[in-house]
Structures are given as C-alpha cells and as structure tokens.
Image (tube, rainbow, N blue to C red):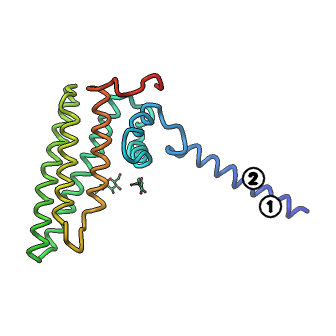
Amino acid sequence: MGIRIAKSRSLCFSLFCFLVLVCCHPCGGKVTKLVQEVCAKTSNYSFCVESLYSDPHAAEADAYWLADIAFRLAYVNATSTQNHILELLKKSTSGDYRGRLQRCGSDYKKAVSAIEMGLNDLNSESFDLLAGYADHAAHAASDCQSAFEGSPNSPLTYMNNAFKGLCEICVVISKLFTDPNSFDFSLL
Ligand SMILES: *[C@@H]1O[C@H](CO)[C@@H](O)[C@H](O)[C@H]1NC(C)=O
Ligand SMILES: *[C@@H]1O[C@H](CO)[C@@H](O)[C@H](O)[C@H]1NC(C)=O
C-alpha cells in the first residue's frame, strides 16, 4: 500500500516536472503573436520559431527588434559557415572539390556582406532594401548548393539550407516595414 502511494506520488512529481519543463521551455511557452505572424509566412514554422527563440529576447521583441535578431542570426550563421568553408579548403587537395569549395567561399563572402548591409540599414532605420539584401544572401547559398551538383559529397547542404531558412525569416520580417498590409495586425 505504502509503496503504491509512493509510486503514484513519484508519478505525480514526474508529471509536475514535465509540465514545468514544457511551460518554461521557450517553444512550449507562449510564442508572441508577432513571431506567430512572421513564422506562419515562412516555409518552416517550427524552424522559424526555434531560430528566433534561440535569442532570449525574442519573446519581448517588437518588429524592429525582431528584425535585428533575425539579421544577427543570419550574420553569425553566414560567418561561421564561411569559416567552416575555409577550414575545409585547408584540408582539401582534390582540384575538382577545391574548385567547388572556392565557389562556395566567394558565395558566402557575398552573403556575409549582403547581411552586413542589411544590419547597417536597420541601424539607420532604412527598410526599403532589407528584403532584397536577405534575398540576395539566400541566392548566394543556393549558388553554393549548385556548386556541388553532380558531386557525391556535398559537405554544405545542411548549412546552406539552414542559412537559406534564416534568410527567409529576414525577408518576411523586412516586409513588416515595407508591406505591412500583407500582415494581419488584428491578431497582434
Ligand atoms: C523544419 O525544421 C525542422 C528543424 O527546426 C526540421 O527538423 C524539419 O525537417 C523541417 N521541415 C521541413 C519540411 O523542412
Ligand atoms: C546555422 O543555423 C542553424 C539553424 O539555427 C543551425 O542549426 C546551424 O548550426 C547554424 N550553423 C552555423 C555554422 O552556425
């Protein structure tokens, strides 16, 4: 009898812990209407929410702040991918593989500078070209992806997709400023 009570108590406790975890986890907790609105317009809602909420300020961010978060995430991602490509280049000897990596290296150089220009524009609160910069950066990642077409090993597929996903979030957020009518602010 005593054992049974102890068991059900520990079950209750586990359930309690589970609920606490779910409620305190950023993705289990409340996703702001703004983030919902933005992420619903991207091709992968959960990727979008997870990415934005990887910044602890996402839950309190207004549109401007959220744009800053998204462009910064893309910037960090692009520069670390760029560094990863440099590391791969150091190790690679085969001419064909090297050529493909070099093309990706120059793609990500363009991507980094496009995102940088986006951050500068955000800083000076000029929004007109933001979506274009993010789109340009996404195209650079697509070009890197096609550099490995027909190659059995494409070491950058995961990173290209992740970066394109982040750029897509930037594009959608940029439209909050230039095309606000496409958002349903009655939800906010
Ligand atoms: C969406 O993103 C998640 C990661 O957040 C990934 O596991 C999933 O495969 C993606 N879905 C699609 C359809 O790409
Ligand atoms: C880029 O972002 C994705 C998604 O947030 C993450 O999984 C990946 O590790 C990041 N890559 C780099 C190189 O930072």
User: From this viewpoint, which residue is outermost toward the bottom?
Assistant: 94
Residue at (39, 31) in percent of width and height: 61
Q: Quadrant of residue 126?
A: top left
**What is the three-letter code of the residue carrying label 2?**
Cys
At horizontal 46% and vertical 22% (from top left) the residue drawn is 186
Q: Position of residue 34 (x, y in %)?
A: 42, 31
Nearer-the-camera pick, 109 or 24:
109
Q: Check if mark 2's residue and mark 1's residue have beta carbons within 8 Å.
A: no
Residue 145 coordinates in the image, percent (x, y): 21, 60
The crowd level at tag 1 (other Cα within 10 Å; few <14, some 14-19, many 20+) is: few
**Residue at numbered disc 1:** 7
Q: Which mark is residue 12?
A: 2
The quadrant of the picture showing ligand 2 is bottom left
Residue 53 percent across, percent down from the top left: 42, 43
* SS state under label 1: helix
Q: Amino acid at mark 1?
A: Lys
Residue found at x 29% / y 39%: 170
Residue displayed at 49% across by 37% down = 31
Label 2: few (<14), some or many (≥20) within 10 Å?
A: few
Seen from the viewer's position, the closer of residues 168 and 117 is 168
Up/down of 27 relative to 66, above or below: below
Q: Is residue 155 left or right of residue 8?
A: left
Q: Measure the alpha-carbon separation of dots 2 and 1.
A: 9 Å
User: Mark 2 CB in 8 Å range of ligand 1?
Assistant: no
Quadrant hosting residue 122: top left
Res 133 label: none
- Judge whether 80 appears above or below 19 on screen: below
Query: SS class of the residue under badge 2?
Result: helix
| Res. 132 image quadrant | top left
Say which label, 2 or 1, has the lower sequence index.
Answer: 1
Q: In the displayed structure, does residue 86 sit left or right of residue 66?
A: left
